[in-house]
Structures are given as C-alpha cells and as structure tokens.
Image (cartoon, rainbow, N blue to C red):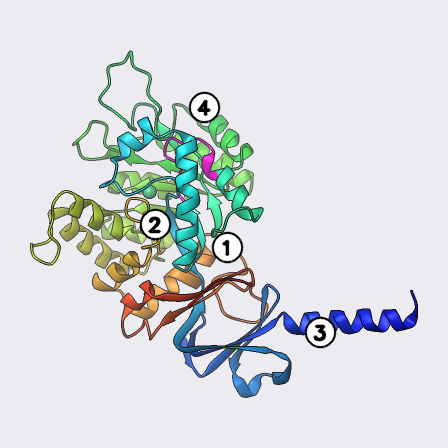
Amino acid sequence: MQSKHYFFLLLFLCLNSLHSQTLLIPERVFDGIAMHEDWVVAVNENRITYAGPMDGLKTAGSYTKHELKGMTLMPGIIEGHSHLLLHPYNETEWNDQVLKESPTERAIRGVVHAKKSLSAGVTSMRDLGSEGAGYTDVYLKKTIDDGIIPGPRTLMAGPAIVATGAYGPKGFHDGVKVPLGAVPVSGSDKAIKEVRTQLGNGANFIKIYADYRWGSGEPSQPTFLQEEINAMVSAATTAGRYVVAHASTPEGMRRAILGGVETIEHGDGATMEVLKLMKERNVALCPTLAAGDAIEQYKGWRKGKEADPERVAKKKISFQLALESGVDIVFGGDVGVFTHGENYRELELMVEYGMEPIKALQSATSVNARILHFDGLGSIQNGYLADIIAVEGNPLEDISQMKNVKFVMKDGIVYKNE
Ligand SMILES: [Zn+2]
C-alpha cells in the first residue's frame, strides 16, 4: 500500500473511532451502588470508559455529546425471574398456555416479549423455565444473541426439573398424556441424567421445584428427597453451573438450601430460622412479589379498595423478615404472569413492602449481576459493558419513575431514545 493511502486509512480509522465515543450527560447517575449528581458517562463502542464529574474527563473534546435532560442514568435493569414464553394468566390460564399453545406460537410471542422487555430497560434477564415449551427459550436466546431480534442478554433455565407427579397441568385421568410444565424425575440417577441432558442442550443453569401443590387447591408440600437435590446440585456444579429452586414451604426451602442451590424463588413461607440458614449458606431470595400481587387481582381483589388478601398479607410479613435477616434480595417479579415490560412493578412492591428505594435499585443492578453471574454488568464504571438506561426524574424520590424509561443502550447500541 502506498504511504499516502495508508495515511488516509489511518485518518479514517481514527475519525471512525472518535465517532463511536459517546458522552452521556444526564441529571444524575446511579452507578449500581449510589446516586451521584452532575456525573457524566463516556462510552467507547460497547464499553464504559469513564463515569464521574465532567472535569475528571481528560479528553472532553473528542466525544459526541448526548444530553439526557432531567433524567437519571443507571445500569440496565437485570430481571432475575422472568418467563419470556408465558403471557399474563388473565389472558390465558397457565394450563391452557401449556396445553393449547404450540412451542412455535410461544416462540413468536416470546419475540414480542423480548422486545418489550428491552424497551422497558431490561438489558439482562434470568429466565426461569420454558414451562412446557422444551428448549424454546434456548433457541430464543440464540436469535437474540445472533442479532436476529432485539432483546435482553439472557440466562435460560430450559425445561426445569420436577419430582414425578408433582407438577401440572393436572386434572386428567391416567390414560391421558399431556405435556407437562417441566421434566419429571425420580431417584438420584435419573435426576443427575436430566441435569446433564438439560445443560447439554443449552440450559445456562438448572431450575428445580423443591416443593409444589400435589393436588390442585392444596397447600405446597416438599417434592424431592434431600439426596435427589444433593445429586442434582453436584451434577450441575461439577459442570460449572448452578441450581436454583422454586420453594415456598420452610421444609422445601431448607432442603434446597442444604443441597446447595444459589437462589430460592418465591419463598412465601420463609421463617426467620430458614432465612438465617440462607444467610449462613450465602443463598439469595428472589421474592417475586409482583406475581402474587397480580394473581390475587386476577382472582378479583380490588387493590387499594379492599383489604389485602391473605396471600399478600403473609407475603408482606415474610418479606419484612427477609429484610431483617439480611439475606441478599434478588429483583425478580415472575414477569410473564403479568405483562412483559412491566418489570418495574416488582420494584414498586419492594419499596411498598418496606425496602429502601436505593436497596431496591441496587438489587435490580449490581446485586443481581453478582448473584446471577452476569459478569461485567450491573454497574456504571470504567471497563464495564455499556448496558445503560435513563429514566425520567429521580427514582429514589419516586420509584414509579422506573416505568418511564426513555433511553436504552445495550452493548453500546442505542435501542430507545425518546
Ligand atoms: Zn416463575
């Protein structure tokens, strides 16, 4: 190549790289831990290169400035418990989704849900099971990661694992074969085999059901034996993966904790004794407040006009206990039970049930990044991936501002700019 051409090529490359640097100038920045007034954030390609006061920025002239007037900039929200392949139960009951909607239909719906989630500021999510749609969640993840459809970064559970006979849909005589919401196993050998099968087929982690209602309308009871849980956790951790457990009874929770799961999902019946055990074993709680709140409203509860139903009243008490116990709280609403894109409802309830707004925001960003294994995310600091959102006003003063997401950047690419 002639040296003149080489010079122009270099100049072009330099200009190009200058153009890809963006300086975001919001009203304030929540960095995943604390709120900072008058900070700016610089982004080069898909990385954050600076976060701090404007006068600390060394090369101020070489950035394209992007003002976010009156807004709070923060890390992209990390949803801890979603079901991209479910839609609200007041539209179609869970049973009918599993029985009557094909995996193809559910995938198409999932495409819409993924887009809505990203637009709502959810740049990462841990999805807690395809609920009868096999590995459709894994395939949905692939299309997002390949850039075919817009959506969050995801960790997918795949089909999930239940004890034989414990999961739905139920109500059929034994001659009728129906698709189940998860894969049933019995015995440690079969449980280990299923963990390996699911990991081999692309599940990023394993979800088990440590308790469930054995008959419809009955209270939940433990499902797996201790040795079955221990075996599944060993099989997963050997593979460098982790296990999470659906559990709402103290005994189901206790077995899952002792077995070595990393998070307990729901935990409605948590007692202080169980919560202390969680704290001791470094197990986090994903309380899914918004799911119970939504389901009770589907059953006819007129929220705000009528007293709390028993389920909600009890949930408030166990959530308070969880806060007192000091366990890590994972932000995760079980979205899918309610409308995708309304993930903020869990944040509103966390605050309504007694959590400090700053703690709720930490949970949805830096805490979830740490607990759910989203490395390099959940924080606005030099070197972190450029998953950045901005919301109107100050969510510390009014957590409901989290519904007003105006700017969404994922991996350095702007998906929303209003
Ligand atoms: Zn769920």
The CB of the residue at mark 2 lies under 8 Å from ligand 1: no
- 3D distance between C-alphas at marks 1 and 3: 33 Å
Quadrant for ligand 1 reads: top left
Of 225 and 202, nearer the camera is 202
Mark 1: which amino acid?
Answer: Phe
User: Which comes sooner in the sequence, label 4 or label 3?
Assistant: 3
Secondary element at tag 4: helix
Q: Is residue 169 left or right of residue 201?
A: left
Say which label, 1 or 3, has the lower sequence index.
Answer: 3
- The spot of residue 362 in percent (x, y) is 38, 65
Distance in Å between CA atoms under marks 4 and 3: 59 Å
Badge number at residue 374: 1
- Disc nearest the viewer among 2 and 4: 2
| Image marks 4 and 1: residues in contact by CB distance under 8 Å | no
Asked which secondary structure carries label 3, the reply is helix
Q: What span is in magenta?
A: 127-137
Q: Is residue 275 above or below residue 32?
A: above
Marking on residue 340: 2
Label 4, label 1: how far apart the Cα atoms are: 30 Å
Residue 16 x/y as whole percent: 69, 70
Check disc 3: other Cα within 10 Å, few if <14, some if 14-19, many if 20+: few
**Residue to which mark 3 is pinned:** 15
Q: Nearer the viewer, mark 3 or mark 2?
A: 3
Number of numbered tags placed on the structure image: 4
Residue 264, compared with residue 16, is above or below; it is: above
- Alpha carbon distance from label 3 to label 2: 40 Å
Residue of label 4: 190
Tag 1 or tag 4, which sits nearer the N-term?
4
Q: Nearer the viewer, mark 4 or mark 1?
A: 1
